Image (spheres, grey):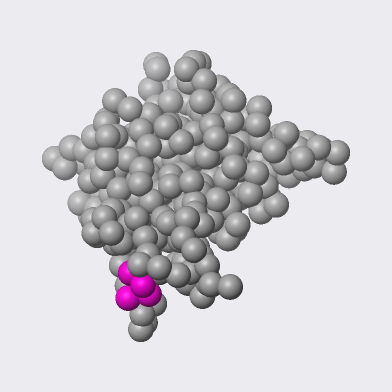
Amino acid sequence: ADVGSRQRRVFEVQATPSLVFSALCHCFEEQRPAEILTIDDKMLCFTAMTFEDFVALHVEVKVFASGIGAVVVPLDLGRTDTVLFHKMLDSLSKVLEPIGLCDSMQPSCLLDFDDDDFDDDEDFMRAEVGVVSWHEVLAPLFLDAVKVSPKRVREYAWQTIARLSKSEPACHVAMAELVVTKCRDLIAVAFGPGRSAQGTPLAETYPMAAALSYASRTSEAAEKMIVMDIFSQALRLPPSLPRCLRKLVGDVVSRCEEQLKARVLHELGRAQGPEAECCMELLQPKCNVEESELCHGSGSDKVSKAVRAIVHGEVGHSA
């Protein structure tokens, strides 16, 4: 009875069950923002956490043999959001179409929803921006995002922060400042080398990483994050980091690194002393700074100290 009450949609595919299962696994492993939690190759079944609009969906996908070929039965195990679950299913239908999707049968009670029919927090906040600063808009969200409990409050806060970061570039600098002042330790635990499977849940870390990724597209925000050493020291992309996080965090590190290179090159024009000579030797003639040398600390201590000294204005300048 419980299984029957969960929202689901059945796909019929004119292809072998193994081919269909392989295509779906590839979709969740390589294409969707998702992490496969369990997989059974013999029973052609897997469970996963995937995301729609930065909201975590806990799903199960089963593939059965049928007279036409295969039947796919996705289940919404968490029953978090019916509308977002069916958006996710729409994306699965696009994966199945090239290999022979024949039909998609859905419950008659499912209604067609239009996103524009719903008012969201971002619309309210956008209207308020003319009166208050982005710092004032974001600060309460960051306060909720770092709370010890309840976890649903943290998840909702990070989802809202991620949506604002995606839709409102004007908030990126204020967001970077709050990340630096409120979330430095949290980010190091979530993405750094000390990360554990029992650490910050993926339902929080994915929208967190997405918010940082969008914010880092604004050069001033990226510079604020790198100057405060968050990504130059705390993040080293541990092997245990899920793929959907690794891509986003890697983008943040790369953009922050580009800002660091630009800052160093600018300061080199005025800097004097051994630090400047060390960086000039590193950057010339092609200005090709290896990621491991600047951001990940695997280069010499002399290089790292020289870069930080120039970025933080701790060296002399020519008159």
| Front one among 132 and 102 | 132
- Judge from the rendering whether residue 101 lies leftward or rightward of residue 136; answer left or right: left
| Front one among 156 and 200 | 200
Q: Is residue 253 above or below residue 200?
A: below
- Residue at the bottom extreme? 285
Measured as percent of width and height from the top left, residue 103 is found at 44, 51
Question: What residue is drawn where x is 58% and y is 60%?
Answer: 219
Measured as percent of width and height from the top left, residue 231 is found at 41, 49
Q: Quadrant of the N terminus?
A: top left
| Front one among 310 and 66 | 310
Question: What residue is drawn where x is 67% and y is 47%?
Answer: 171
Q: Can residue 278 be found in the magenta stretch?
A: yes
Q: Can residue 97 be found in the magenta stretch?
A: no
Question: What residue is drawn where x is 47% and y is 55%?
Answer: 314
The span shown in magenta is 277-281
Measured as percent of width and height from the top left, residue 301 is found at 26, 55
Q: Quadrant of the C terminus?
A: bottom right
Q: Main secondary structure of the magenta part?
A: helix
Q: Is residue 190 above or below residue 275?
A: above
- Residue at the front extreme? 319
- Judge from the rendering whether residue 78 lies leftward or rightward of residue 175; answer left or right: left
- Residue at the right extreme? 131
Label total for image: 0
- Residue at the left extreme? 42
Question: What residue is drawn where x is 36% and y is 72%?
Answer: 277
Q: Is residue 308 above or below residue 282?
A: above
Measured as percent of width and height from the top left, residue 182 is found at 54, 32
Q: Is residue 188 visible?
A: yes
Q: Is residue 31 visible?
A: no
| Front one among 254 and 234 | 234
